């Protein structure tokens, strides 16, 4: 009996040992021969901590063997089972360059040689381009990056329409693979950028664009984090065909309400998909809807075959859906739900941003637009589809101060990067440029703080303290002196000319560091002894082209932050100069000065008008007597298109209007008018050089025309009206004149 027990024990031990050896051998072989292209990357280094295994973000929804056809496609069985080989072939273009990064799939040579220039292929005969893609190409061709010479280009963009790659769409371009491969500059997609809004089709809506993109970068909407190639692709927002090409509407937040709570806490109104991908989240929204402050409305009444698939809730949901106006909900909600649809992205995203309704994202795995540079935690609530029922309690716990900050950031991001196709395209290009020139790339503060990355050009400086927008963030102040730039266009024939009197008055200012005289006169430079002796350096620069825009060139001689821009016939006292500079030190990002003008909308002519009437309202401060930051010289020269500057130079007019347009577009603020003597207008009109221009009947008509041309390029009217005038303390008060610091202003 004991021998039998020993025999059974020995047999059991042997069986266990054999089983362990077998299992160990299988794992050992698997470790020696890992599957090619494994998603977990290389094995850990010896001694390194073993990483946690990666699990998918969400369970895949159950997919039946037979899928119904797409809604609106006609018929009920358009989509059958897809074989693994077909699926693999369909996604070949998307995944072949999956390991591409800037270092491996991009040629930096041309960019560092010629700068960041973008070439757009010429349109091929017979090829149709949708309006949305025409807007994309127009934005590139109208930018400062565009070049018509492919030999100078750093980046190439196809003229073939790649925005809509849904095979069921009427905008779908057929045979795109062969057309792309036939391009002589294609080079397997190297240094190419492909824009795409829609990819894949029923039933899976994959992210396949339908052709082999090779080593090209994707600027793609609704791209997943799984397929997104960091620091190579760019995630862009999904925008509609009606999205404006330039300008765009401003955000809807007109004033801050305290507390920042609206009628509704959380809203959504949109389609509900009864079957297929993207249906799970929207089908579950009714669990959260309470009909009071959480209003989440869905309808299944869309597509031709909706009645065939409708469920027991459809009729009730459709009826409630019709009771609410979407615009009214949007404008009166604190938070807006942005659930995924068929694809990860949704039009609701941009709609919520514009309406100052804080987006609550419910789209697991979506790489948010421009996530490389935008910190979305400052403007949105990132939710999880699996935790839908926790969303109401989560947003109710957000403090009111945080809600106000989130709302304000939505408005900044909307106006800075998303309000037009042009801004979306330019943001994409600027991100790529920052990757190429990393040593001068913008940091997170620039991208996420006003005025944003599009107006802060890193070629000017890599130090934030050189820009007028970040003094408060850095705890800095602008330099306590200014450089005066006097624009001279009249020969110096008399020692009593206004330009000489102006030069002496400015030189006496305690804040004046130097004076630059820009000699744009056709006559030769006056002899050195003709200029009056001053206590500050006087530098005379002869303009090479002698055009109006040359007064705003970024001269190396300007070493101060502030520039006092002056016409040669301006009449200002030293006290007025001192006071204007003191005011500017508190508003270094704005134009501060004396002569003010205004704009208005002419309903009869349906165009913008320009007026010089002295009223209590103004929107411009002319640069004939104004102080501003020297960075605006660089921005005027390098940001504005050559077409506008050429117009100014040909007319010899409107340069001051264009500078006001630029500064107001950047700051979203009006200029600041300061106190001046009453006879300023009459004195200016009495001078010789400027009187001829003001007396010219064409001069005023030209300025009217300039207003409308500038507004057309900006896409909107950036000028902002103001009724604020800053006076010295005790100005005009009935107290002793000895108590007033700027007492001379009242005597003038």
Image: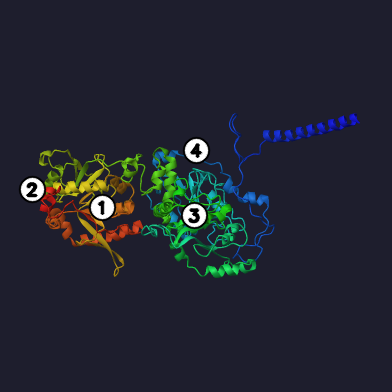
Q: For mark 2, what is the residue?
A: 496
| Number of other residues with Cα within 10 Å of mark 2, as a class: few under 14, some 14 to 19, many 20 or more | few
Q: Is residue 19 above or below residue 165?
A: above
Residues at discs 4 and 1 in contact (Cβ within 8 Å): no
Question: Which mark, by number, is residue 649?
Answer: 1
Which color scheme did the rendering employ for the protein? Answer: rainbow
Mark 1 and mark 2: Cα distance apart in space:
29 Å
* 3D distance between C-alphas at marks 3 and 4: 41 Å
* Nearer mark to the viewer, of 1 and 3: 3
Single out the mark in the foreground, 4 or 1. 4
**How far apart are labels 1 and 3 at the CA level?**
55 Å
The relative height of residue 441 versus residue 730 in the rendered view (above or below) is above
Looking at the rendered image, the quarter that the N terminus falls into is top right
Say few, some or many: other residues with alpha carbon within 10 Å of mark 3 (under 14 / 14 to 19 / 20 or more).
some
Image spot of residue 658 (x, y percent): 28, 54
- Image coordinates of residue 551 in percent, x first then y, are 23, 47
In space, the residues marked 4 and 2 are separated at their CA atoms by 65 Å
Task: Please tell me whether mark 4 sits on a helix, a strand or a loop.
Answer: helix
N-term mark: 1 or 2: 2
Badge number at residue 395: 3
Splitting the image into 4 quarters, where does residue 28 fall? top right
Sequence-wise, the earlier of marks 3 and 4 is 4
**Cα gap from disc 3 to disc 2, whole angstroms:** 71 Å
Does the CB distance between marks 3 and 2 fall below 8 Å? no
Q: Quadrant of residue 34?
A: top right
């Amino acid at each position: 009996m004991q021998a039998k027990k020993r025999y059974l024990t020995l047999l059991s031990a042997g069986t266990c040992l054999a089983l362990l050896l077998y299992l160990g051998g299988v794992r050992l072989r698997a470790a020696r021969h890992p599957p090619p292209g494994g998603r977990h990357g290389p094995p850990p280094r010896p001694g390194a901590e073993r990483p946690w295994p990666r699990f998918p973000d969400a369970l895949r929804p159950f997919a039946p063997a037979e899928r119904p056809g797409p809604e609106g496609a006609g018929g009920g069985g358009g989509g059958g089972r897809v074989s693994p080989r077909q699926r693999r072939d369909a996604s070949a273009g998307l995944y072949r360059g999956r390991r591409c990064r800037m270092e491996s799939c991009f040629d930096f040579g041309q960019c560092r040689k010629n700068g960041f220039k973008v070439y757009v292929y010429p349109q091929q005969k017979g090829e149709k381009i949708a309006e949305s893609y025409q807007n994309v190409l127009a934005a590139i061709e109208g930018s400062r990056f565009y070049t018509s010479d492919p030999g100078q280009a750093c980046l190439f963009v196809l003229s073939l329409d790649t925005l809509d790659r849904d095979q069921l769409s009427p905008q779908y371009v057929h045979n795109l693979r062969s057309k792309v491969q036939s391009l002589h500059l294609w080079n397997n997609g190297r240094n190419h950028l492909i824009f795409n809004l829609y990819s894949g089709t029923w039933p899976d809506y994959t992210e396949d664009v339908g052709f082999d993109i090779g080593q090209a970068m994707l600027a793609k909407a609704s791209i997943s984090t799984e397929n997104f190639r960091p620091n190579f692709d760019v995630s862009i927002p999904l925008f509609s065909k009606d999205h404006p090409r330039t300008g765009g509407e401003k955000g809807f937040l007109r004033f801050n309400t305290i507390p920042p709570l609206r009628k509704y806490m959380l809203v959504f109104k949109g389609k509900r998909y009864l079957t297929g991908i993207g249906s799970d989240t929207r089908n579950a929204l009714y669990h959260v809807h309470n009909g009071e402050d959480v209003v989440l409305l869905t309808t299944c009444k869309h597509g031709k075959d909706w009645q065939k698939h409708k469920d027991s809730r459809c009729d009730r949901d459709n009826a409630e859906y019709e009771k609410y106006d979407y615009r009214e909900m949007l404008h009166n909600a604190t938070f807006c739900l942005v659930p995924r649809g068929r694809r990860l992205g949704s039009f609701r995203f941009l709609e919520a941003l514009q309406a100052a309704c804080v987006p609550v994202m419910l789209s697991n795995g979506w790489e948010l637009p421009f996530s490389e540079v935008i910190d979305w935690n400052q403007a949105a609530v990132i939710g999880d589809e699996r935790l839908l029922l926790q969303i109401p309690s989560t947003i109710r716990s957000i403090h009111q101060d945080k809600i106000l900050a989130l709302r304000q950031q939505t408005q900044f991001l909307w106006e800075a990067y998303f309000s037009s196709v042009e801004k979306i395209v330019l943001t994409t290009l600027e991100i790529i440029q920052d990757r190429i020139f990393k040593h001068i790339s913008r940091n997170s503060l620039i991208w996420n703080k006003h005025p944003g990355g599009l107006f802060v050009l890193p070629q000017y400086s890599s130090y934030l303290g050189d820009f007028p927008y970040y003094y408060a963030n850095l705890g800095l102040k602008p330099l306590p002196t200014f450089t005066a730039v006097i624009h001279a266009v009249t020969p110096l024939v008399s020692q009593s000319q206004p330009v000489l009197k102006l030069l002496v008055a400015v030189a006496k200012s305690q804040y004046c560091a130097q004076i630059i005289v820009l000699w744009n006169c056709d006559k030769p430079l006056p002899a050195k002894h003709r200029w009056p002796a001053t206590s500050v350096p006087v530098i005379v620069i002869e303009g090479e082209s002698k055009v109006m825009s040359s007064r705003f060139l970024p001269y190396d001689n300007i070493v101060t932050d502030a520039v006092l821009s002056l016409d040669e016939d301006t009449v200002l006292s030293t006290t007025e100069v001192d006071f204007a500079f003191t005011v500017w030190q508190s508003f270094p990002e704005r134009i501060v000065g004396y002569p003010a003008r205004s704009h208005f909308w002419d309903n009869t002519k349906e165009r913008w008008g320009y007026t010089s009437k002295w009223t209590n309202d103004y929107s411009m401060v002319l640069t004939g007597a104004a102080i501003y930051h020297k960075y605006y010289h660089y921005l005027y020269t390098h940001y504005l298109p050559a077409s506008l500057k050429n117009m100014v130079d040909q007319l010899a007019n409107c340069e001051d209007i264009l500078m006001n347009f630029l500064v107001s577009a950047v700051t979203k603020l009006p200029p600041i008018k300061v106190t001046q003597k009453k006879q300023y207008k009459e004195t200016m009109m009495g001078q010789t050089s400027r009187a001829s221009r003001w007396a010219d009947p064409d001069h005023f008509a030209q300025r009217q025309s300039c207003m409308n041309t500038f507004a057309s390029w900006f896409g909107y009217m950036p000028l902002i009206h103001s009724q604020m005038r800053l006076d010295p303390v005790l100005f005009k008060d009935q107290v002793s004149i000895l108590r007033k610091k700027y007492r001379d202003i009242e005597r003038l």
